[in-house]
Image (cartoon, rainbow, N blue to C red):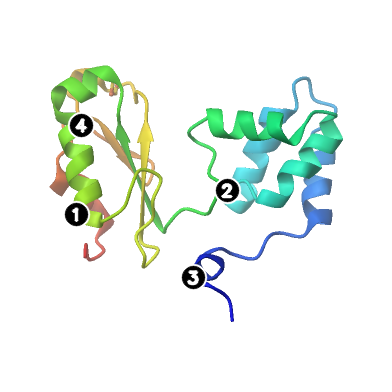
Amino acid sequence: MPDDLSMSLPALPPTEEIAALVAAKLNLEGPLLPILHELQETYGYIPENALGIMAEALNITRAEVHGVVSFYHDFRSRPAGRHVIKICRAEACQAMGGAALGAAVLERLGVEWHGTTPDGAITIEPIYCLGLCACGPAAMVDGRLIGRATFETVIEPIGERVK
Ligand code: FES
């Protein structure tokens, strides 16, 4: 019987499928980022089994691939929830109440940054400037920008019950 962690993770995509996706981008200049974007667009995250495939194809170490994946906040190591809330954590928004907004949302949903509620409804992610600095704190809900964000304006567009 699978443990809780394995139950929350989807089955990994077939390695042949990932290898084909990687191979299709190999002749680009600086192919790693385009490959990572393609993987995230295809699967919604960067599957664990893709790291070694990329490393071998690009003749770099798995640690180097992992370093790039973890450097960019937009790459996920597991699938997101049905809705994604991004809250700006850059300086201007932090000074305008962004820190308090982030803390309130995390506490209410009972998750950490990059976490997903147990029902899979909502993922909370930090982002570092959305270009709405004059209207901070800024957030993005399912791709829609929200200025002067509050707990209500961030949660209400989702329309799912907040536990
Ligand atoms: S600092 Fe938050 S949108 Fe620019």
Kindly indicate the quadrant of the structure image that contains residue 153.
top left
Toward the viewer: 128 or 21? 128
Residue 24: tell me if it is visible.
Answer: no
Q: Secondary structure at mark 4?
A: helix
- Is tag 1's residue or tag 2's residue first in the polypeptide sequence? 2
How many numbered marks does the figure carry? 4
Residue extending farthest bottom: 1
Name the residue that disc number 3 marks: 4
Q: Residue at x 21, y 47 (%)?
A: 105
Tell me the mark number nearer the camera, choosing from 2 and 4.
4
88 displayed left or right of 79: left
- Is tag 1's residue or tag 3's residue first in the polypeptide sequence? 3
Name the residue that disc number 2 marks: 45
Q: Is mark 1 within 8 Å of ligand 1?
A: no
Residue 110: tell me if it is visible.
Answer: yes
- Is tag 2's residue or tag 3's residue first in the polypeptide sequence? 3
Kindly indicate the quadrant of the structure image that contains residue 1.
bottom right
Disc 1 marks a residue whose amino acid type is Arg
The residues tagged by marks 1 and 2 sit, at their Cα atoms, a distance apart of 25 Å
Ligand number 1: quarter of image: top left
The residues tagged by marks 2 and 3 sit, at their Cα atoms, a distance apart of 20 Å
The residues tagged by marks 4 and 3 sit, at their Cα atoms, a distance apart of 31 Å
Please rate how many residues cluster around mark 3, counting C-alpha atoms within 10 Å: few if below 14, some from 14 to 19, many from 20. few
